[in-house]
Image (cartoon, rainbow, N blue to C red):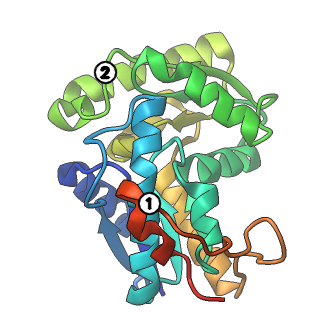
Amino acid sequence: MKIKVINPNTTWEMTRGIESAAKSVARPDTEIIAVSPDMGPTSIESFYDEYLAIPGVLQEIQKGEHEGADAYVIACYGDPGLQGAREITTAPVIGIAEASLYMASMLAARFSIVTVLPRVKTMMEELVHGYGMGHRVLNVRTTPMCVLDFERDPEAGMRMLAQEGRKAVEEDHAEAILLGCAGMAEFANNLEKELGVPVIDGVVAAVKFAEAIVDLGKTTSKLKTYKLPEPKHFTGIFADFGTLVPKK
């Protein structure tokens, strides 16, 4: 099968790290295609960044329909564009936050998220509540590091994640830790050994869920909510977006 993994930001160094994480758990017969959109922010650390990343994500979904993708992974912890992406394909589309929350709920009764800058805390909390996981997530812990800092200084990144992860276990009584950024995948295994609880990276969780759904032959329901958008004319910088909608 072919899984297209979309890093919604435009930093290819980060995309290559995401690709490595995805390939590390994919089956030998699973092809991973990891991409960044042609347009969008270099990192996603605000609502503004997230909203402007979505058009690029939708374009990559549309390209994937011509590339023969069997499933898609949106590799940003805000899951930007997830619902809209599901409307323009029948293939399963998995967000890494959604995947990590569902996997954690099968492994632990309560868990905490460790993520990047303090400003994203409210974004994460709203995301968690949107997935109906508010009663399972004990805390969203932040670090003083931005998304790309984890690429530039992995030693500091590991130190910050271990520090907040330890607080989550000791103070929150978290029974698992979720890494709240696609750029944190490389730290998961070492953190798990250090903290003594499951540490879940959303990229690898999403890839395994995607493989399972494709193996089961399941596709995105087109009955109502995720049916194809109604064709219409778009203007201005979105003039080409009407062409993203497949013909019924």
Q: Within 10 angstroms of label 2, few (less than 14), some, or many (20 or more) residues?
A: some
Quadrant in which the C terminus appears: bottom right
Asked if 83 appears above or below 26 in the picture, the reply is above
Distance Cα–Cα, label 2 vs label 1: 38 Å
Asked if 178 appears above or below 241 in the picture, the reply is above
Asked if 152 appears above or below 227 in the picture, the reply is above
Q: Earlier in the sequence, mark 2 or mark 1?
A: 2
Residue 122, percent from left and from top:
59, 21
Task: Write the residue at 69% across / 18% down.
Answer: 173
Seen in the image, is 23 located left or right of residue 134? left
Residue nearer the viewer, 118 or 32: 118
Q: Nearer the viewer, mark 2 or mark 1?
A: 1
Residue 114, percent from left and from top:
50, 27
Asked if 116 appears above or below 233 in the picture, the reply is above
Residue nearer the viewer, 171 or 49: 49
Residue nearer the viewer, 29 or 193: 29
**Mark on residue 145?**
2
Residue highlighted by disc 1? 235
Marks 1 and 2: in contact by CB < 8 Å? Answer: no
Task: Write the residue at 75% across / 33% down.
Answer: 129
Seen in the image, is 4 located left or right of residue 42? right
Q: Given the image, on which type of amino acid does mark 1 rest?
A: Thr
Image quadrant where residue 144 sits: top left
Task: Write the residue at 68% across / 75% down.
Answer: 228
Residue nearer the viewer, 232 or 15: 232
Residue 208, percent from left and from top:
56, 67
Q: Given the image, on which type of amino acid does mark 2 rest?
A: Met
Residue 85, percent from left and from top:
57, 64
Residue 248 seen anywhere in this rendered image of the structure:
yes
Image quadrant where residue 87 sits: bottom right
